[in-house]
Amino acid sequence: MAKSLFARMLVVYLLIIFIAFALLGGIFFETLKSQFLDSQMNIMKENAKIINDWYTLNYYGQMSDDEFLAKLLIKAANEHTVIWIVTPLGELRFNADPEDKSNIEDVYSAGNSFDFLSDTMKGIEVKRVSDFNNSFKDTVMSVAVSLKADDTIHGAIVVHKAVKDVGVGINAIYRQVFIPLLISVAIAAILVFILSRYIVSPIKDISYAAGELSRGNLDWRVKSKTQDEIGELAEAFNKMAEELKMQDGLRNTFIANVSHELRSPLASVQGFVQGMLDRAIEENDRDKYLEIVLGETKRMNTLISDLLNLAKIESGKFPIEYSQFDINELIRRSILAFEKRIEDKQLEVNIRLADEKLFVWADEDRISQVITNLVDNAVKFTPSGGELKVWTHAADNKVYVSIADTGEGIPVEDQPYVFERFFKVDKSHSQSTPGTGIGLSIVKRIISQHGEKITLQSVPGKGTTFTFSLTRTFEGASPNPRV
């Protein structure tokens, strides 16, 4: 479990949430604490103003020292504070400490260092949080303001309050923030748990489906439940499974086709040779049957050559050797190679070539193979008396070569698979349309190796047109269009 994707995602997400909330919570708590202490000091400052009013009454004789001290003690007790009245000379005149929080016993003791006096004597208020030079047992927050009467500064009023005395308020704030924070973390953890399962569950389904495919169950599919990246992954997996199933079907068909294509000529060769050895064939007929044997061996040789070429192309061991050549001249030479077959089927040949010369940048031998395969297909599938059409045209920096026949065309359902290796439209294995479905696969891969495209247009009952593109060059210019 610790090594599973779900567990790792869950742990990482929870750590991120914990760290984020810890940092935010710490900053938030410290901010709240600082604000709370400031608010307490402001209250202490307001109390100092009240004390200053009492001092004014004391200064003008309207309140005795005992009455003034009594009021200080009552206020200090009610507010849980310690109140000092300090003279300009640094003497502690009054010390209201009913709860005995400070270490100072003699209110008139000399030698006390009040480093805030220089500021308060200038009318500057002082705020601090400390033990006030070891004057207190615990940390206190202190506010010192000027002691005034008759528009004259007579010293300082210092109000102290132990920080632990405001801890109840701070703890209340902590509770108000910490509990919602814990609830938020819990909710976030639950959402992370659900999200992790949401992400991992379809991945586990895909993993299981991959195992099924590896065991040969090519019909297994993943149910796509979402439209996000996981859903796209499931769709891509299903498309891959479809391709594998199709390739498996094509492979089986290919094996059957190749077996048939090899078995038939081998059976013929074996039968005729055996007949000659058994003297069952007359001496006068031997040349005729030897011609048949030679034709069958040539047919097998062509099949094997196609298979080897396809294997080389797919393995990347079929290098492209670019050169500049006239595609129109190559087409003329290729058509001449089919002159006898064209005459035998009494085909009408219609050739329309753009310009007298049309130069391209490609591998001449490989493009010759492409044209030969396409013309061979056109001648093969055009009925006697039909028409073979070849034309070229140029647009921008491209040359387009089209080869069309007037045969039966390709069924719509078969058209997407015509360029797939091992695919054969004619599934009857008839000798009138020999082949293994390798030729067009070779054509497609040669054109793709050139970085070009080949397209198919076919109308059942009217014929088929193949068009491929090549990069155009001009005579006298740099042969390499990339230079």
Image: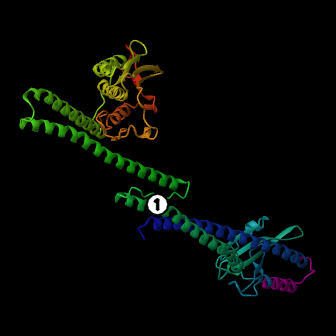
- The correct choice, above or below, for 65 with respect to 36 in the image is below
Instruction: Point out residue 296 in the picture as x, y percentages from the top left corner.
Output: 20, 33
Q: Amino acid at mark 1?
A: Ile
- The correct choice, above or below, for 327 with respect to 233 in the image is above
Instruction: Point out residue 457 in the picture as x, y percentages from the top left corner.
Output: 46, 31
Q: Dot 1, crowdedness within 10 Å: few (<14), some or many (≥20)?
A: some
Residue in the image at 39% along x and 32% along y: 451
Instruction: Point out residue 311 in the picture as x, y percentages from the top left corner.
Output: 27, 39
Residue 95 sits inside the magenta stretch:
no
The stretch of residues the image draws in magenta is 59-77
Residue 63 sits inside the magenta stretch:
yes
Tell me the quarter of the picture where residue 164 sits. bottom right
Q: Which residue is at the front of the view, 65 or 441?
A: 441
Q: Most extreme residue toward the top, as rendered?
A: 356
- The correct choice, above or below, for 61 with respect to 9 in the image is below
Mark 1 lies on residue: 203
Q: Which residue is at the front of the view, 134 or 408?
A: 408
